[in-house]
């Protein structure tokens, strides 16, 4: 990781450090999608940002709460964590806590596939890079109208060339290396920091979302008031997560699919405690 980390300016004028500039507008647009279907944050809240990446969701929460918020942000990939840490130091280091680990169903070390040219897609499934490439290609080419602007230009090409160009881009984007990362559980953090409530639990962890939820001890579920989560619907994971949430009182549930992901197995879920 270079000492000199590049920075860019978001549409709202905020400066952020980044790893891969092309991902910044995508991440910035994506975080706007978390605050819907009743999901809100208020001053004084406690928020968990699981899969924090470079911290744009944490920044959004910090702004919405006028810097009066406690955020616990988790990012296991060392290169990405360094950028997250730099961003938080700039924004609100006293109230935004960052952790160089992921959250899972138990404390352990896990091998991640890290994509230096597409760091947001890094995940704990080191053998699925070919599957990931094929799925992403099919989804984006099917939904070009909703793709980021630099990808949308593929519409100008004949269909047979779109696939060829995407394959060329993909070879660069999906070069991977294996990284050993530390994992903890939500309940580990609750115990360690004596957390009384989690007003919003945000989870975006590239296929490991169910593991995050399984790392919550039974007595801690009542602390969680709202949840927004990206789900990769493998082995009926959406249904399993809905059932798990309902058992623990998060019964106001909405599931939808962003336009870019239409026809894929990626869904967004929003859940609130019944008494919210």
Image (cartoon, rainbow, N blue to C red):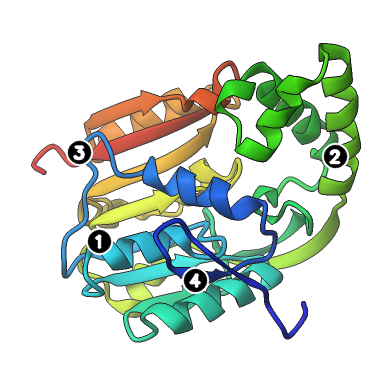
Q: Nearer the viewer, mark 4 or mark 2?
A: 4
Closest to the observer: 210 or 177?
177
Snapshot quadrant of residue 80: bottom right
Q: How far, Cα to Cα, is label 2 from label 3?
A: 38 Å
Q: How far, Cα to Cα, is label 4 from label 2?
A: 27 Å
Q: Residue drawn at (66%, 30%), measured in percent from left and top?
A: 152
Q: Residues within 10 Å of mark 2 (few under 14, many from 20)?
A: few
Q: Residues within 10 Å of mark 1 (few under 14, many from 20)?
A: some
- For residue 68, side relative to residue 14 (left or right): left
Residue 124 at least partly seen: yes
**Relative to 257, residue 75 above or below:** below
The disc label shown at residue 169, or none: 2
Mark 4 / mark 2, whichever is N-terminal: 4
Q: How far, Cα to Cα, is label 4 from label 1?
A: 17 Å
Q: Nearer the viewer, mark 4 or mark 1?
A: 4
Element under label 3?
Answer: loop
Q: Residues within 10 Å of mark 3 (few under 14, many from 20)?
A: some
Element under label 2?
Answer: helix
Q: Nearer the viewer, mark 4 or mark 3?
A: 4
Q: How far, Cα to Cα, is label 1 from label 3?
A: 15 Å
Quarter that holds the N terminus: bottom right
Q: Residue drawn at (79%, 27%), measured in percent from left and top?
A: 134
Quarter that holds the C terminus: top left
Closest to the observer: 10 or 57?
10
User: Mark 3 — residue?
Assistant: 38
The disc label shown at residue 15, or none: 4
The disc label shown at residue 64, or none: 1
């Amino acid at each position: 990781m270079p000492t000199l980390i590049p920075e860019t300016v978001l549409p709202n004028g905020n400066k952020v450090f980044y790893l891969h500039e092309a991902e910044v507008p995508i991440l910035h647009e994506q975080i706007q999608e978390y605050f819907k279907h009743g999901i809100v944050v208020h001053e004084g809240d406690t928020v968990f940002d699981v899969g924090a990446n470079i911290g744009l969701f944490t920044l959004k929460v910090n702004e919405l709460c006028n810097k009066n918020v406690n955020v616990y942000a988790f990012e296991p990939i060392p290169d990405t964590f360094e950028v997250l840490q730099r961003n938080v130091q700039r924004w609100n280091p006293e109230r935004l806590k960052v952790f160089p680990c992921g959250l899972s169903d138990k404390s352990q070390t896990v091998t991640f596939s890290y994509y230096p040219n597409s760091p947001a897609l890094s995940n704990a499934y080191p053998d699925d890079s070919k599957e990931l490439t094929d799925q992403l290609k099919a989804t984006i080419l099917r939904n070009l109208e909703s793709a980021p602007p630099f990808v949308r230009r593929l519409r100008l090409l004949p269909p047979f060339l779109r696939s060829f160009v995407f394959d060329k881009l993909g070879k660069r984007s999906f070069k991977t290396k294996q990284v050993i990362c530390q994992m903890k559980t939500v309940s580990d953090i609750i115990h360690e920091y004596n957390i009384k409530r989690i007003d919003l639990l945000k989870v975006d962890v590239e296929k490991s979302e169910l593991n995050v939820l399984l790392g919550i001890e039974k007595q801690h579920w009542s602390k969680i008031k709202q949840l927004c989560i990206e789900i990769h619907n493998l082995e009926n994971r959406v249904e399993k997560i809905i059932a798990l949430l309902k058992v623990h009182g998060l019964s106001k549930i909405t599931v939808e699919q962003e336009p870019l992901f239409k026809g894929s197995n990626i869904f967004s879920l929003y859940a609130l405690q019944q008494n919210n």
